[in-house]
Image (cartoon, rainbow, N blue to C red):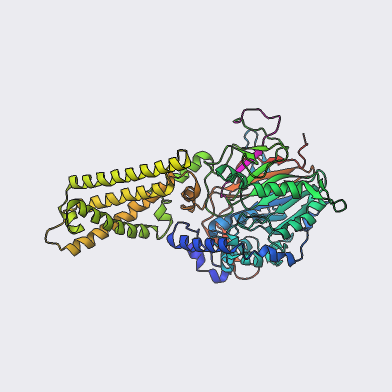
């Protein structure tokens, strides 16, 4: 059965399955904007991380993750808790006792048999569009509990809050993940919104809570100094889970975005304060792998080594010595693009306030991304393709209605201006009596005046900034909507209105025509504006406005007896849209995929050595 039918069984399921969030639907956009504003304003005055300092905490462990174990399997998923089909498909993949996938490296067929992780890491944004107890129940807890109702090995579950988890001040997140309650077969154990897990073979897993990208609070730092820095030994390897890929943001204009993570690496992981002398001393440990979500795609940046070729465009050969920066935010939320990712990242970047004490590192983007660059461009264009099911007004209920209302108002404004140029007393008179020449003359005046204003604004920016800048995205939006409004006016002028019809009737019909045409033309104008954006929120809307449900995935990590860490990036090109209802061991019903899910490796597994000196 489909999602709509599943909703009718909400009482038996114990939760109400939800559809994918439609981010550019006007109602959803307004509600989320208010919550974001409130969270941003009040976060600094109501920081629950400070309160968490009163809670007992320690290193987290699980029966199959004891430090003396020979190996361990770990799952990482981020940006989950969106539409039921996508979120549940990923949850079922994580819950399977074993996955068998083929190596995509070519050559001789190699199969990898990957057992379920003894540790599940939720890497941020566990619910959409904003945190609440009901949203977590319907979008996260319900689907995950249904996918794994029981498990004899009781895998440990740890969660890191992202910006969407912070939109209610972290209240619902703490209730769900820090009280030791199970979520189906997974067992929670953390007592704070951050964590440190001691893993086998001298590996450590660290989850950082940077509260909407601001800073790391003092109680959190004290926790990591006590439970991480104090216990690190030379040669230990550290995996850092962060809420955002700040390393990529450094290339988007914010050169200081990586400062917090760089500072944590330098002062918490690589050094500590000697309790006897009070002096700093090296720990001998190093961060070998950085994991994050937030961007809903898969992308990997590998460290350039000193003995690599000087050619900046050369493909980096697999080498366990390389540190890796991995973004994998494919847990359930809309798919994001990859074709604007920078090819290289110097960290820290030039101009950053926090300078590297040693030589800055350079990371190069791996050839494989998900979606790949070509597919990413193709998918992005669908938001402005009227015959596509992903067209902006089709995927965002209410958008066409808002565009219709806007263009009815714009028709009134343009028709009044047109009437003034024609010497008519009323807009209806101008529309009835004008011809194509009159309209072309009016359009010429409007276009010429707009060009002059744009030129003056451009010149002002040039004088004040001392450099050439492209027109702002807001300017592009206004120009495109203005062009659509002129086209709507032209249609009303071209209609042969009968002379016996009253002016009020013609006005009402003109507004109706403007609304109908404006719904399509206004939506398309806004979609073209989004498609023309190269950065910022508007560029992100190219994919968020489509709410793509397919193309999801997660990471499966393996710490082997040789102490190397192997990362398997797994994806589902198609999520399940057809479900059967079966009896739940705990009572009631639970949804089960009607057909087997097909997972695959998006690239060959890559290996990260615990120590950089490994040959």
Q: Quadrant of the C terminus?
A: top right
Report the side of 528 relative to 572 (left or right): left
Residue drawn at (59%, 36%), measured in percent from left and top?
367
Give residue 249's position: percent from left, percent from top.
58, 46
Give residue 75's position: percent from left, percent from top.
68, 52
Q: How many marks?
A: 0
Could you say which is closer to the camera, residue 306 or residue 379?
A: 306
Q: Residue furthest right?
A: 276
Could you say which is closer to the camera, residue 532 or residue 354?
A: 354
Give residue 426's position: percent from left, percent from top.
19, 59
Residue 80, by quadrant, is: bottom right
Instruction: Examine the rendering and report whether any part of residue 438 can be seen.
Output: yes
Q: Residue furthest left?
A: 500
Instruction: Examine the rendering and report whether any part of residue 69 can be seen.
Output: no
Residue 87, by quadrant, is: bottom right
Report the side of 500 relative to 521 (left or right): left
Report the side of 363 relative to 272 (left or right): left
Q: Which residues are magenta?
A: 295-312
370 versus 48 height, above or below: above
Could you say which is closer to the camera, residue 519 or residue 428?
A: 428
* Residue 311 located within the stretch drawn in magenta: yes
* Residue 299 located within the stretch drawn in magenta: yes
Report the side of 295 relative to 564 (left or right): left
223 versus 602 height, above or below: below
Give residue 170's position: percent from left, percent from top.
62, 64
Dominant SS type (magenta): loop
């Amino acid at each position: 059965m489909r999602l709509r039918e599943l909703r009718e069984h909400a009482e038996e399921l114990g939760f109400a399955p939800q559809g994918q969030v439609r981010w550019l639907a006007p109602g959803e956009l307004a509600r989320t904007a208010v919550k974001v504003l409130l969270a941003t304003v009040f976060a600094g005055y109501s920081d629950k991380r400070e309160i968490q300092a009163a809670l007992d905490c320690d290193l987290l462990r699980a029966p199959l993750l004891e430090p003396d174990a020979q190996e361990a399997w770990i799952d990482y998923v981020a940006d989950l808790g969106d539409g039921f089909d996508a979120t549940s498909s990923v949850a079922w993949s994580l819950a399977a006792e074993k996955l068998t996938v083929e190596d995509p490296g070519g050559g001789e067929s190699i199969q990898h048999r990957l057992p379920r992780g003894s540790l599940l890491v939720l890497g941020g944004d566990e619910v959409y569009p904003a945190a609440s107890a009901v949203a977590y129940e319907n979008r996260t807890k319900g689907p995950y509990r249904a996918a794994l109702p029981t498990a004899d090995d009781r895998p440990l579950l740890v969660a890191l809050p992202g910006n969407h988890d912070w939109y209610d001040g972290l209240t619902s997140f703490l209730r769900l993940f820090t009280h030791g309650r199970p979520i189906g077969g997974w067992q929670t154990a953390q007592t704070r919104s951050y964590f440190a897990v001691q893993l086998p073979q001298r590996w450590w897993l660290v989850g950082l809570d940077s509260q909407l990208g601001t800073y790391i609070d003092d109680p959190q730092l004290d926790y990591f100094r006590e439970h991480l820095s104090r216990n690190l030994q030379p040669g230990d390897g550290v995996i850092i889970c962060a809420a955002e890929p700040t390393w990529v943001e450094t290339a988007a204009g914010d050169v200081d975005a990586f400062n917090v993570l760089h500072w944590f690496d330098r002062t918490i992981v690589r050094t500590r304060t000697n309790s006897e002398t009070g002096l700093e001393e090296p720990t001998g440990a190093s961060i070998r792998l950085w994991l994050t979500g937030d961007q809903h795609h898969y992308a990997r940046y590998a460290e350039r080594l000193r003995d690599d070729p000087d050619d900046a465009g050369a493909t980096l050969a697999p080498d366990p010595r390389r540190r890796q920066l991995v973004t994998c935010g494919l847990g359930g939320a809309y798919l994001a693009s990859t074709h604007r990712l920078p090819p290289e990242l110097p960290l820290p970047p030039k101009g950053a306030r926090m300078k590297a004490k040693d030589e800055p590192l350079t990371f190069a983007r791996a050839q494989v991304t998900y979606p790949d660059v070509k597919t990413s461009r193709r998918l992005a264009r669908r938001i402005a393709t009227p015959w596509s099911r992903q067209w902006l007004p089709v995927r965002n209920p209410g958008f066409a209605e808002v565009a219709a209302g806007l263009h009815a108002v714009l028709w009134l404004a343009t028709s009044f201006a047109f009437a003034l140029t024609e010497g008519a007393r009323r807009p209806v008179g101008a529309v009835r009596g004008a011809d194509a020449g009159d309209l072309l003359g009016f359009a010429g005046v409007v276009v010429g005046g707009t060009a002059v204003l744009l030129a003056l604004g451009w010149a002002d920016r040039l004088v004040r900034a001392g450099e050439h800048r492209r027109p702002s995205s807001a300017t592009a939006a206004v120009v495109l909507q203005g062009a659509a409004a002129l086209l709507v006016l032209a249609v009303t002028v071209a209609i042969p209105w009968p002379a016996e019809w009253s002016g009020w009737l013609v006005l009402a019909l003109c507004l109706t025509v403007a609304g109908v045409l404006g719904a399509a033309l206004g939506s398309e104008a806004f979609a073209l504006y989004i498609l023309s954006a190269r950065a910022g929120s508007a560029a992100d809307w190219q994919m968020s406005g489509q709410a793509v449900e397919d193309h999801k995935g997660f990471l499966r990590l393996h710490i082997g007896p040789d102490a190397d860490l192997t990362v398997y990036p797994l994806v589902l090109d198609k999520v399940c849209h057809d479900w059967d209802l079966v009896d739940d061991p705990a009572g009631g019903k639970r949804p089960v995929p009607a057909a087997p899910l097909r997972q695959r490796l998006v690239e060959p597994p890559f290996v990260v050595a615990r120590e950089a000196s490994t040959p």
